[in-house]
Image (spheres, rainbow, N blue to C red):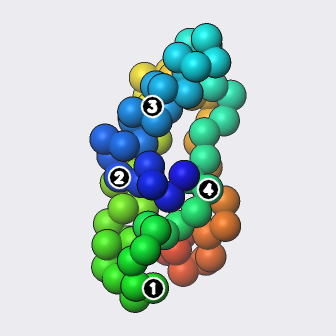
């Protein structure tokens, strides 16, 4: 969810999902949308949130809580940032 962007929120969202599903690991965890809700399109907060969220997913992967990580609905520009 765009409301779960940022390092801490992404980590918490994953752990909550694992608990609700009764699992120890997810097969795939994605950043679904590359922007924060209710922020102007040109806001630099989007870029920072994407970066922090991706770092959280990398850490979840290293902790073996997810088997694979990825993104959805990102443009080439988002990925290059």
**Which residue is denoted by mark 2 in the rendering?**
6
**Which residue is denoted by mark 1 in the rendering?**
41
Q: To which quarter of the image does residue 9 belong? A: top left
In front here: 2 or 54?
2
Mark 2 residue element: loop
Residue found at x 58% / y 19%: 20
In front here: 22 or 57?
22
Labelled disc at residue 32: 4
Labelled disc at residue 60: 3
Mark 3 residue element: helix
Q: Is residue 22 above or below residue 9?
A: above
Q: CA distance from mark 2 to mark 4?
A: 13 Å
Q: CA distance from mark 3 to mark 1?
A: 28 Å
Q: Position of residue 39 (x, y in %)?
A: 39, 77
In front: label 3 or label 1: 1
Q: To which quarter of the image does residue 42 belong? A: bottom left
Q: Position of residue 47 (x, y in %)?
A: 38, 71
* Residue at the extreme front: 38
Q: Is residue 53 above or below residue 16?
A: below
Of the numbered discs 3 and 2, the one sitting upstream in the chain is: 2
Work out whether residue 25 can be spotted: no
Residue found at x 61% / y 13%: 23
């Amino acid at each position: 969810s765009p409301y779960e962007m940022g390092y801490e929120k992404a980590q918490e969202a994953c752990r909550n999902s694992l608990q609700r599903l009764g699992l120890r690991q997810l097969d795939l965890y994605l950043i679904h949308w590359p922007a924060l809700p209710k922020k102007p399109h040109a806001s630099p907060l989007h870029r920072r949130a994407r970066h922090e969220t991706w770092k959280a997913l990398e850490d979840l992967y290293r902790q073996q809580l997810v088997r694979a990580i990825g993104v959805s609905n990102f443009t080439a520009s988002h990925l290059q940032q």
